[in-house]
Image (tube, rainbow, N blue to C red):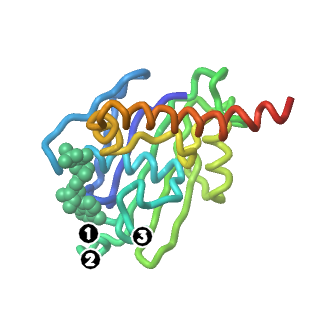
């Protein structure tokens, strides 16, 4: 499945309903002035994917994700991702019959949080399972290369880069390969 559209409403700097579509299946770039809301779009995607560490979406609480922290008359933040699911070989488990899948996450001032799949209310775990079945685990530390992290690596001096690569390699061996070897 691939991302077809994003609807952001009341999330971070997107006070009004904003729809973004026309995505390429393989490569997309977001351009715009500093502070215009590019990273907020990525944060919105991570929000629906179920990010648990809010620091990674640059917020201290769910409330902070609402437009102006809920202080400007907008009390709800909602993000909907629509996926094209016509390629059944890449469908999430149990969704092979759906040509399109929409996943929405909403939060309301006061901390109420809800998820919807294809318009129906579901438990958090249903969304987690859906994405994990297509290897989309936003909470896996290898998944994210968030703002600033690429720059940090690029600015490193050679010995630091070697150390960083060694560290990442050890981390991958430890977290990804070792458990698989243990299963054999
Ligand atoms: P850069 O090019 O510097 O990386 P950017 O396009 O990625 O910029 P973002 O980080 O997406 O910009 O957006 C930053 C803007 O979002 C800031 O002006 C910030 O005040 C605004 N913002 C963040 N959270 C909220 C919120 N809850 N309500 C309203 N505005 C918010
Ligand atoms: Mg940015």
- Judged from the image, the secondary structure of the residue bearing numbered disc 3 is loop
Question: Callout 2: 10 Å neighbours few (<14), some, many (20+)?
Answer: few
Query: The N terminus lies in which quarter of the figure?
Result: top right
Query: Mark 1 CB in 8 Å range of ligand 1?
Result: yes
Q: CA distance from mark 1 to mark 3?
A: 13 Å
Q: Which of the two discs, 2 and 3, labels the residue nearer the N terminus?
A: 3
Query: Mark 2 CB in 8 Å range of ligand 1?
Result: no
- Viewer-proximal residue, 140 or 61? 140
Q: Which of the two discs, 1 and 3, labels the residue nearer the N terminus?
A: 3
Picture coordinates of residue 73, whole percent (x, y):
26, 74
Which is in the foreground here, disc 2 or disc 3? 3
- Res. 37 visible in picture: no
Question: Callout 3: 10 Å neighbours few (<14), some, many (20+)?
Answer: some
Residue under circle 3?
A: 61
- Residue 68: which disc? 1
Picture coordinates of residue 12, whole percent (x, y):
30, 59
Question: Callout 1: 10 Å neighbours few (<14), some, many (20+)?
Answer: some
- Res. 139 visible in picture: yes
- Residue 154: which disc? none
Residue under circle 2?
A: 71
- Judged from the image, the secondary structure of the residue bearing numbered disc 1 is helix
Q: Quadrant of ligand 1?
A: bottom left
Q: Is residue 57 above or below residue 38?
A: below
């Amino acid at each position: 499945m691939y991302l077809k559209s994003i609807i952001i409403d009341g999330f971070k700097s997107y006070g009004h309903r904003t729809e973004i579509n026309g995505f390429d299946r393989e490569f997309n770039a977001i351009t715009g002035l500093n502070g215009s809301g590019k990273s907020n779009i990525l944060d919105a995607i991570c929000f629906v994917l179920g990010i648990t560490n809010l620091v990674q979406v640059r917020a201290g609480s769910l409330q902070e994700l609402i437009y102006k922290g809920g202080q400007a008359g907008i009390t709800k933040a909602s993000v909907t991702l629509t996926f094209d699911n016509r390629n059944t070989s890449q469908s999430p488990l149990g969704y092979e019959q759906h040509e399109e899948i929409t996943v929405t996450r909403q939060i309301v001032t006061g901390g109420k949080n809800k998820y919807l799949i294809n318009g129906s209310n579901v438990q958090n775990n249903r969304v987690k399972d859906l994405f994990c079945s297509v290897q989309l685990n936003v909470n896996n530390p290898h998944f994210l290369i968030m703002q600033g992290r690429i720059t940090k690596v690029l600015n490193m001096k050679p010995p630091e880069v070697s150390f960083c690569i060694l560290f990442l390699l050890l981390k991958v061996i430890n977290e990804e390969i070792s458990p698989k070897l243990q299963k054999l």
